[in-house]
Image (cartoon, helix red, strand yellow):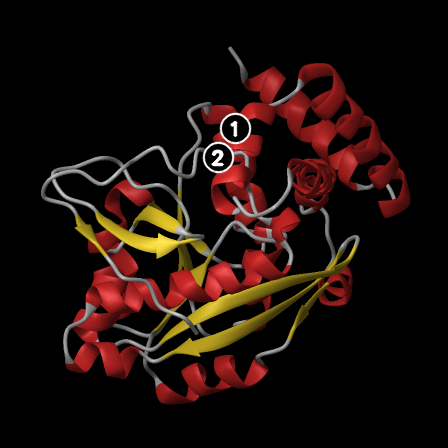
């Protein structure tokens, strides 16, 4: 029944992705006016998140960061849609990969590795960049399925173009353990707010206790699997770099310190955000959980 609609949307996205970048960025600017000034998409959520993260900053500076975030968010949307037809040459030019030695080491070792990523910069291109440069090493990405089956199908096509295999977050822990017994790289997104369960771990992140997913930490520390933080930077509009920075897994594995591992990569992300806050995804509710009885709260870590 909905097949014609699916192919209509898919065809439209294909045609849109064929537009030159300069045209797409003009469209992004129109989207910015609509999202920021007309619709006001999640403006209160973004403002609240920024004020919680940077209580020392004056309101005018916070609002400037918010405006720059929306400009980036609209660019991110059109850049992600560009992924439908983005060529290898364009990917290499616009997402520079600065860690070929890491992939070479993983390939030669025969061991697996964990990549800790985040919603900073262009996370869709980051995923594509790592997949493209992984070479013969199989790659997997933990992801959140979309509720709409047709958009889910479209996004799966974009995200698997460069060879990655997707693992739904509902089955992520067991599936990751299974695949990591072999030879692969698995990407975990570290900055999503976990579902409330009996107990949560709260790391000190951006100056306040923040609930953290610890699946990647439990696997890395429990199995002593090498782990890397994907340090993404936006150089200029439409141009990024990705550097895989080692996390000292062996240190935390020696004492089974899962929380310490979590604090470590949280501190790495915080340092990136504080340097240039406009490029993190502030439109999510970052602090919807507060510590309560039974939860653990960390002391934080500086890196």
For residue 293, which quarter of the picture?
top left
Residue drawn 29% across and 35% down?
Answer: 289
The percent coordinates of residue 252 (x first, y second) are 23, 77
For residue 262, which quarter of the picture?
bottom left
**Circle 1: element type:** helix
**Circle 2: element type:** loop
The percent coordinates of residue 83 (x first, y second) are 67, 47
Residue drawn 66% across and 20% down?
Answer: 40
Q: Are marks 1 and 2 in contact (CB under 8 Å)?
A: yes
Name the residue nearer the viewer: 239 or 84.
239
The percent coordinates of residue 99 (x first, y second) are 57, 79
Check the picture and name the quadrant holding the C terminus. bottom left
- Confirm whether residue 230 shows in the render: yes
Mark 2 sits on what residue?
A: 284
Q: Nearer the viewer, mark 1 or mark 2?
A: 1
Q: CA distance from mark 1 to mark 2?
A: 7 Å
The label number, if any, that marks residue 45 in the structure image: 1
Q: Earlier in the sequence, mark 1 or mark 2?
A: 1
Above or below — where is 142 with respect to 110? above
Name the residue nearer the viewer: 178 or 8.
178
For residue 169, which quarter of the picture?
top left
Query: Is disc 2 surrounded by few (<14), some (14 to 19) or many (20+) residues within 10 Å?
Result: some
Residue drawn 72% across and 40% down?
Answer: 64
- Confirm whether residue 186 shows in the render: no
The label number, if any, that marks residue 131 in the structure image: none
Residue drawn 29% across and 60% down?
Answer: 216
Query: Is disc 1 surrounded by few (<14), some (14 to 19) or many (20+) residues within 10 Å?
Result: some
């Amino acid at each position: 029944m909905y097949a014609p609609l699916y192919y209509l949307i898919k065809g439209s996205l294909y045609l849109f992705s064929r537009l030159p970048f300069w045209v797409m960025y003009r469209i992004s600017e129109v989207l910015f006016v609509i999202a920021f000034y007309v619709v006001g998409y999640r403006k209160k959520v973004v403002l609240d998140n920024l004020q919680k993260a940077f209580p020392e900053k004056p309101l005018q500076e916070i609002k400037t960061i918010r405006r720059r975030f929306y400009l980036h968010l609209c660019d991110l949307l059109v850049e992600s849609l560009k992924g439908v037809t983005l060529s290898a040459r364009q990917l290499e030019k616009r997402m520079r990969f600065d860690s070929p030695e890491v992939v070479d080491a993983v390939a030669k070792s025969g061991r697996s590795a964990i990549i800790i990523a985040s919603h900073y910069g262009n996370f869709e291109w980051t995923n594509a960049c790592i997949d493209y440069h992984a070479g013969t090493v199989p790659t997997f990405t933990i992801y959140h399925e979309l509720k709409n089956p047709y958009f889910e199908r479209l996004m799966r096509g974009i995200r698997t173009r460069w060879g990655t295999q997707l693992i739904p977050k509902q089955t992520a822990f067991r599936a990751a353990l299974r695949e990591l017994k072999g030879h692969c790289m698995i990407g975990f997104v570290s900055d999503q707010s976990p579902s409330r369960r009996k107990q949560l771990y709260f790391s000190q992140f951006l100056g306040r206790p923040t609930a953290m997913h610890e699946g990647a930490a439990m696997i890395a520390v429990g199995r002593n699997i090498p782990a890397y933080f994907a340090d993404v930077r936006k150089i200029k509009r439409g141009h990024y770099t990705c550097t895989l920075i080692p996390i000292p897994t062996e240190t935390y594995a020696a004492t089974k310190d899962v929380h310490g591992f979590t604090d470590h990569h949280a501190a790495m992300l915080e340092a990136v955000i504080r340097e240039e806050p406009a490029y993190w995804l502030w439109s999510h509710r970052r602090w919807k959980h507060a510590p309560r009885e039974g939860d653990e709260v960390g002391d934080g870590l500086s890196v």
